[in-house]
Image: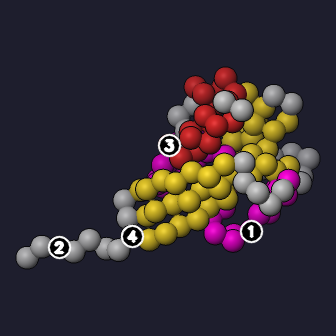
Amino acid sequence: MIDKRPPATKRRFAAFIVRRDDRFLVAQRPSGVVNGLLWEFPNVEGKGRVGEFATLGRKPICQVRHSITRYRILLEAFAARLISPEPPANMSWRTMAECEKLPFASAHRKILRQLRDE
């Protein structure tokens, strides 16, 4: 008997591209989760709470389509600003050169490349 694969599940994320001078706000994922310890831009799934961020427009800077196992992901990156004076504890400011040396999750690395090529 052949096992049937589960149907593909669509997921949508919004990433927040926050710049301060020549640095970007990035976060390292916790260990023990998908893409654990990899770096990424702050993001939320679906219509999740934005919390610390305010987008600077309704149109995304770029869109990335990505697949992980059965998930078909659309990641939209928006220019944003940080609402609070300091970022959350799990985030840090990094230059483009520093970001390029960090192990980014592949979908977020695609965003990083687009930002570099602007």
Q: Look at the image and give the residue range highlighted in magenta.
A: 28-56
Look at mark 3 in the image and give the residue it sits on: 106
Pinpoint residue 4: horizontal percent, then vertical percent: 21, 74
Amino acid beneath label 1: Arg
Query: Given this view, does label 1 or label 2 mark the residue nearer the observer?
Result: 2
Is label 4 or label 2 in front?
Answer: 4
Disc on the earlier residue, 3 or 4? 4
Relative horizontal placement of residue 19, taking residue 105 as reference (left or right):
right
- Determine crowd level at label 1: few under 14, some 14-19, many 20+ residues with C-alpha closer than 10 A: few
Is residue 57 positioned above or below 103 on the image? below
**Viewed as shown, does residue 38 lie left or right of 114?**
left
Q: Between disc 4 and disc 1, whose residue precedes? A: 4
Give the amino acid type for the residue marked by disc 4 in the picture: Ala
Quarter of the image with the N terminus is bottom left
Type of amino acid at the residue the image marks with label 2: Asp
Q: Residue furthest left?
A: 1
Q: Earlier in the sequence, mark 4 or mark 2?
A: 2
Is residue 89 something that shows in the picture? no
What residue is disc 2 on? 3
